[in-house]
Image: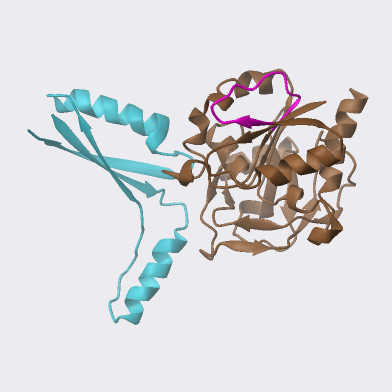
Amino acid sequence: MIKAYIDVTLKKSILDPQGTAVKKGLEKLGLYAEDVRIGKHIEVVLREDKIEAAREKIDEMCRRLLVNFEVETYSVRFEVIE
Amino acid sequence: MKAGVIVFPGSNCDIDAYKVLERLNVEVKYIWHDEKIDDEDLILLPGGFSYGDYLRCGAIARFARALENINEHIEKGKLVLGICNGFQILTELKALPGALLRNKNLNFICSDCNLIVENNATPFTNLFNKGDVVNFPIAHGEGNYYIDDDGLKELIKNNQIVFRYQNNPNGSVYDIAGIVNKKGNVLGMMPHPERAQDKLLGCEDGLKLFNSIIAYFKEA
């Protein structure tokens, strides 16, 4: 089986007020960050052996439901599991 | 004129919407999310938190049985009014362009809100004058309307912007509070006209929107 780790983030052109608020919170703790952006993490397990086939399925899932391309984008990492 | 108010698990403005139509003598019924829409002239998608707003606001509602035939309903030229969560659902359905993001100040905002009527040539606003200022309350955490520059140009060119905020509360692009599709028969808006239906509730500006819909069907 293959496990996909999907990160859904706001597009660079979209302001992320949540990230800005957290950045300011970190600064109050004395921890300076250049930038903070917040997104979503989704894990999907597929009954597949080949990563290529898994990628195709995940891309379709992202396209059709998991990601709103008006404002979001995504990246995926795959892992073969038992 | 027949109207249906769709009730999703998590809808919470369905009763207000039903009541305003009922008191204006419209034949109205509730449509449970698991039922099909029939031959209603107006389908109203109410505010609330359909399916817990899981994944994204409105993202799961588009799979409801009640919305299976919504595209045909729209193609036939019948009306759809999406208020608040209903607007979010309509953007997820791609019945309206753009998306609704977290409010710029991150707060859930619940307050009165002045809007400017930008377009009174729609079935939803024909009793207003262009430039009228009306007060419909807002109550949302994700009402920050986003559309890219090209999309905004399209909206302006096609006169699709119906309501704009007088004082932008949530960071929406171009102060947009409500838009219609190109055809003009689908309106999505974050403010709540159904919560402005009686002076006892503070304001009755919203009645005019529902009376516009009734007037539209009387003329038709």
Image spot of residue B14 (x, y percent): 66, 42
Instruction: Locate residue A52: give its quadrant.
Output: top left
In the rendered image, which quarter contains the C terminus of chain B? Answer: top right
Image spot of residue B9 (x, y percent): 52, 40
Q: In the rendered view, does B168 fall on the left or right side of B63? A: right
Image spot of residue A76 (x, y percent): 25, 39
Is B32 in the magenta?
Answer: yes
| Color style of the picture | by chain
**Which secondary structure is most common in the magenta stretch?**
loop
Please name the residue shown 28% across and 26% down the image: A57
Instruction: Locate residue B158: give its quadrant.
Output: top right
Please name the residue shown 29% across and 82% down the image: A30
**Along the line of sight, the residue nearer the viewer: B49 or B152:** B49
Farthest residue in the left direction? A82
Is B45 in the magenta?
Answer: no
Q: Is residue B120 among what the camera can see?
A: no
Image spot of residue B31 (x, y percent): 64, 29
Residue range in magenta is B30-43
Q: In the rendered view, does A62 fall on the left or right side of B110? A: left
Q: Colour of chain A?
A: cyan
Q: In the rendered view, does B3 fall on the left or right side of A80? A: right
Please name the residue shown 75% across and 38% down the image: B159
In the rendered image, which quarter contains the N terminus of chain B? Answer: top right
Q: In the rendered view, does B92 fall on the left or right side of A58? A: right
Q: Colour of chain B?
A: brown
Give the answer, above or below, for where B220 lies relative to B144: above
